[in-house]
Image: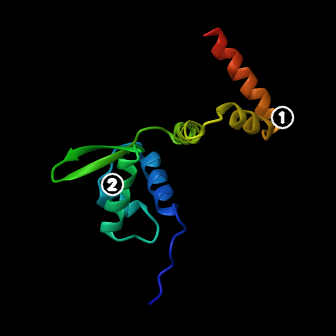
Amino acid sequence: MTSARRAHGELESEILAALWAVATPLTPGQVQHHIAGTPAYSTVVTTLSRLHDKGTLTRIRTGRAYAYAPVADEAGLAARRMRQVLDAESDRRTVLARFVSGLAPEDERELVRLLGEADGA
């Protein structure tokens, strides 16, 4: 019996999507029921624990298990990842310059607008 393997990070993405969709903390068993292909319970628990260890999820005790919830919405999580990449680089100015030079013109205008709003805050 051959099982289709998920691409690296795909289960994490599916779990986050499930948690964002319900907008309430879920136990591993509840998460398992929201995932296509119904991965093994132990796989779901391991993945939830890893996401918690990375700081992507919070957890609260519910009986003998934990219920998990994302620490941020999808946009917040993407921004957090961008910040982590930037923090890992020693030449931040060059990284930012290369990032901005690769933006589409409308994204660059939006970034300038957002920076202008931040200056006024």
Q: Position of residue 64 (x, y in %)?
A: 16, 54
Mark 1 and mark 2 lie on one chain; the one further toward the N terminus is: 2
- Residue at 32% in and 50% down: 26
Residue at 68%, 22% in the rendered image? 114
Q: Position of residue 96 (x, y in %)?
A: 70, 34
Residue denoted by label 2: 49
Q: Nearer the viewer, residue 113 or 25?
A: 113
On the image, numbered disc 1 is attached to which residue? 105
Q: Quadrant of residue 61?
A: top left
Say above or below: 65 vs 80. Answer: below
**Secondary structure of residue under mark 2:** helix
* In front of the other: 90 or 82: 90
Q: Give above or below for 44 relative to 83.
A: below
Q: Quadrant of residue 60?
A: top left
Disc 1 residue type (three-letter): Pro
| Residue most extreme to the left | 63
Check the image and tell me how it is coloured. Answer: rainbow
Label 1 residue SS: helix
Label of residue 93 in the image: none
**Quadrant showing the C terminus:** top right
Q: Residues within 10 Å of mark 1 (few under 14, many from 20)?
A: few
